[in-house]
Image (cartoon, rainbow, N blue to C red):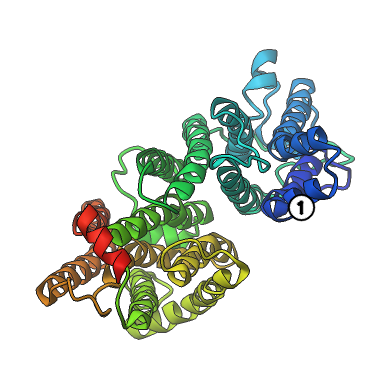
Amino acid sequence: MAVGGGDVNSVPALCLTLVLLWSLLQWTAPWWLPGLAKRYPESPDQMRWFDRALTLVPALLLIIAALDLSRAHLAYDLTYAHVAAYGDADLPSWKRLLVTPFYSEGSLWFSAAVVFSVAQLVMEGRNGRDSLFDVDGDGAGSRQQTLRWNGWLWPIILLGFISSDVFAVHSEPQTVTGEAVGNSAVLFTCAGAVLLAVWINALGRFSQSTLTGEGGQRSVLVSGGIASALLLTAALPERTAGMDWVAGTEHIALGVPGLLLVTSLVVAFIGYPLFLSLLARVHAARGQASGRRFLGLARTFGHTLVFCWLSGTFLLEPLPSVSGWHSAMWEAFTLLLPLALFGLLGTLLPLTGLDARQRPEAWGFNLGMALSLPFLTMHEPLTALLAPGLFAAMTTTPLLATHPEGRVDLPRQTRAIESVVIITTSVAALIALHMGLESSKWLFAGILLLTSQALFAHMACRPTPEASAVGEQE
């Protein structure tokens, strides 16, 4: 991405590289910045300014990159690879200055990055500027979540979606290629970027609320769901006239890394908030188990790994490069191994002090898999085909984990009915997605089944004060 592919230093590439390095500070700041403030108590204003700079600096760097790229287009400087590929000397000056650098195929996610960084600043100002140094309320916890999710998302945007050759600068003018622009795709991507800023800030507050109870998930799910739909639409290859549906197998076989990478992000955008909501809801409705808790944890691990493997098997089998079900099962297993490793590493998070949630090992397991899936997809795009199974498991395992545990107030009939409905719906969803690679009707049916099982899991455990009180006494 950011180092550029030319033989001259590129200002846009340099700025993007600095944003990438800055994301490491965002990710780690909740651990070291409060301690640094305690070590130097005489400089509270400087520490608060640095806290604000954690999200301000990426926006400034991206604005500088955008201005430099606009200047190059205005001057029609063909030493810039972006100008040679997407510039047009016949356009009016204002279009070359404002439109061409952002409304082109090579700038889909560059435009989104600029919009996302600015929207993030706007959201922080609108929400009262939570700080890592807030001692009253949940401001510090919300700020920690916001910074960590920013630090996770920036590498995915900069490394996964933006090519290094796009912003290369050369010592000699380049040949004009005149590639087409895609205005609608950029608009969808930028709208999705705005909603991502909304999602990150809403998720920060929602994550804090689920530590003590359920609430506030609507804004997270709405923003995450619409952002996912917009980004998936933008990532789809443009269809030619008269083409109603391009088979999903053709998209995957041709290699559409942007589409697969966005698909992997859906687990974090929608699946993880649903998991947090269901985790709090199940605890409020059914309380703590009186025994056999290890079986609930084993059910979580086993169900998740099995359905990730099934998802890969069902979605790999139709691909032209896969020779039958046996090959699909083996390839799905090899794709699952690194994802499972990161999930198991996530179970160690409670040992670092992150054990405030119910079922902290299950939370760390799901978080590790959700965070690592996009990075594994960047390395091997077919890993994204495990996403439907992970989504299906993540949005139901907090409920399924209660079935093998010792709970005197949970009838066996209820356990059996819930398990059968969830497992049947999950398998049916994967089969529908398997058929959906050839037909859009089955694809939407699979998505509907995944949504309905998450809704069923939430409706199956309605919190009541009596149940919560009984659970706390066990």
**Residue beneath disc 1:** 35
Q: Give the quarter of the image for residue 397.
A: bottom left
**Amino acid, disc 1:** Gly
* Viewer-proximal residue among 190 and 136: 136
Q: Is residue 445 above or below residue 64?
A: below
| Residue 122 higher or lower than 462, as above or below | above
Expressed as whole percent of the image width and height from the top left, the position of residue 181 reads: 56, 32
On screen, residue 160 above or below 325 = above
Residue plotted at (24% across, 68% down)? 431
Asked whether 375 or 179 is in front, the reply is: 375
Q: Residue furthest front?
A: 473
User: Could one spot residue 356 in this view of the protein?
Assistant: yes
Residue 407 spot, x, y in % from top left = 23, 75
Q: Is residue 304 left or right of residue 29?
A: left
Quarter of the figure with residue 457: bottom left
Residue at 65% of width from left, 50% of height from top? 151
Q: Is residue 161 at least partly visible in the picture?
A: no
Q: Is residue 239 left or right of residue 290?
A: right
Q: Is residue 192 left or right of residue 418?
A: right
Quadrant location of the C terminus? Answer: bottom left
* Image spot of residue 22 (x, y percent): 75, 47
Residue 422: image location, x then y, percent: 21, 67
Residue at horizontal 53%, vertical 63%? Answer: 377
